[in-house]
């Protein structure tokens, strides 16, 4: 693979494209209890927290041969049992985000149908979106990469064109208003959504492949720049949405299930041109579909390898059926599970993006395996990070069970 050894640009683009996607539609609704100023601080804290664990994984990954996966170094450092638990949490996360993004994409597509025909066909929307993404994933290779790249390019183009048309609607007084804190359970519910909004960790092995082990400074810069730019985009999005929709409007969206079509309908109200409304819908569709393709491709590859290893099944169709049929059925039964699914996925994501990295790095340091990059903090920081992450995870889990 070609190595871009003289620039962090390509790696930064990869990280921003991985982070910014369909999940951003859940952020304004999730952060409604905090509002803009406190919500922005919350996002910055989440970004720094997740960046730290990402840099830990860079340290660990670079101690192993290039191309090593999470499975490889987790099994080597922590054993088969921990690796099995991490694998289960990964599959659980991928299934939940596939369901969440399939639900969101189908809801947006149903809204597009309504605009064109005056009628909504939610079940047909689920079927069509499922058939489309499964066909793209089954085809694989360069075709899948080109389709995903097309949706990513469309996502960012439509985002900046659509939001530019809303800038004049932003109320500074509304953005900078300082409502009282919501309840503690409501605030704890925002944590998993903030965590999954910075879930770039699966791209770290790909990032190392781009630059190679010797160019670790570009890997680190790509992560720092990518997370920083993504945080600014999130804050910009938060300012726009919270400058247009007041707290009661966002609470109403949450009460209606919080799916993307409800959010976009509320944002598109008032006297906006059809052109701006169309751009907004296309942005939503491109964003959530690109996220759906990226997330489900990882799940498909995992299940395909599993079937080939244990059952000798090399055809793509069984893996595609296992990947998309359960989420599609769930979308038909429970169509508005976008925000709850992302929240549950965020809690599971904590296991391998917050708790796992410090454990891996502590074990790698004890094992004496060396690498070209060293995470700039001692073992006390790693123990403190793990303890903080564990306490947050327990609090989120208990809160979610109570809710």
Image: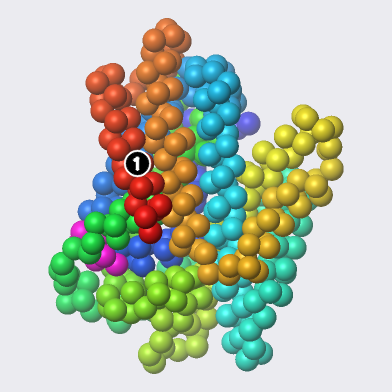
Say above or below: 212 vs 156: above
Task: Indicate left or right for 280 with 113 as reference.
Answer: left
**Magenta stretch holds residue 33:** yes
Give neighbour class at mark 1: few <14, some 14-19, many 20+ (Cα, 10 Å): few
Region rendered in magenta = 32-39
Task: Tell me what residue is drawn at x 54 percent, y 18 percent.
Answer: 79
At mark 1, the secondary structure is helix
> Going by the picture, which residue comes out furthest to the front?
402
Find disc 1 in the rendering and name its residue: 394
Quarter residue 141 falls in: top right
Colouring mode (rainbow / by chain / secondary structure / one colour) = rainbow
**Residue at point 34%, 23% (across, down):** 375
Describe residue 48's horizontal placement relative to residue 180 as left or right: right
* x and y percentages locating residue 29 in the rendered image: 36, 67
Q: Is 399 above or below relative to 385? A: below
Residue 133 in the image: state x and y as whole percent: 69, 59
Residue 356, image x, y percentages: 43, 30
Is 58 in front, or is 384?
384
66 above or below 155? above
Instruction: Indicate the quadrant containing the C terminus: top left, top right, bottom left or bottom right.
Output: bottom left
Instruction: From the top left corner, tell me how far across and down residue 348 is, in percent.
Output: 47, 43
Say which residue appears at 44% left-offset and 36% top-offset. Answer: 351
Which residue is found at the position 36% from the left and 41% from the top? 393
- Vertical placement of residue 307 versus 374, above or below: below
Residue 173 shown in magenta: no
Q: Nearer the viewer, residue 128 or 400?
A: 400
């Amino acid at each position: 693979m070609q190595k871009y050894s003289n620039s962090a640009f390509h790696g930064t683009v990869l990280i921003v494209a991985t982070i910014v996607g369909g999940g951003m539609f859940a952020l304004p609704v999730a952060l409604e209890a905090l509002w803009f100023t406190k919500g922005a601080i919350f996002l910055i804290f989440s970004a720094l927290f997740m960046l730290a664990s990402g840099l830990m994984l860079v340290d660990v990954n670079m101690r192993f041969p290039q191309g090593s996966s999470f499975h490889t170094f987790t099994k080597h450092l922590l054993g088969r049992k921990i690796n099995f638990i991490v694998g289960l949490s990964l599959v659980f996360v991928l299934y939940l985000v596939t369901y969440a993004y399939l639900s969101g994409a189908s809801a947006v597509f149903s809204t597009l149908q309504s605009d064109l025909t005056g009628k909504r066909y939610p079940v047909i929307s689920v079927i069509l979106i499922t058939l489309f993404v499964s066909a793209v994933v089954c085809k694989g290779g360069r075709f899948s990469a080109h389709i995903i790249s097309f949706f990513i390019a469309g996502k960012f183009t439509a985002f900046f064109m659509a939001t530019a048309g809303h800038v004049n609607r932003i109320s500074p007084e509304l953005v900078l208003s300082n409502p009282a804190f919501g309840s503690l359970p409501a605030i704890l519910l925002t944590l998993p959504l903030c965590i999954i909004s910075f879930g770039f960790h699966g791209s770290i092995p790909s990032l190392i492949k781009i630059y190679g082990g010797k160019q670790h400074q570009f890997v680190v810069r790509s992560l720092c720049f990518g997370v920083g730019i993504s945080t600014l985009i999130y804050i910009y999005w938060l300012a726009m949405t919270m400058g247009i929709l007041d707290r009661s409007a966002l609470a109403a969206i949450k009460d209606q299930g919080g799916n993307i079509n409800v959010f976009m309908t509320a944002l598109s109200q008032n006297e906006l041109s059809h052109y701006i409304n169309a751009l907004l819908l296309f942005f939503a569709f491109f964003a959530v579909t690109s996220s759906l393709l990226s997330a489900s491709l990882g799940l498909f590859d995992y299940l395909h390898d599993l079937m080939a290893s244990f059952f000798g099944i090399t055809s793509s169709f069984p893996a595609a059926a296992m990947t998309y049929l359960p989420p599609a059925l769930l979308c038909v039964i429970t169509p508005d599970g976008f925000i709850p699914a992302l929240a549950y996925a965020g809690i599971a994501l904590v296991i391998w993006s917050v708790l796992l990295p410090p454990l891996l790095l502590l074990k790698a340091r004890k094992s004496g395996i060396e690498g070209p990059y060293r995470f700039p903090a001692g073992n006390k920081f790693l123990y403190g990070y793990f303890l903080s992450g564990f306490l947050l995870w327990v609090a989120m889990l208990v809160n979610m069970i109570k809710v």
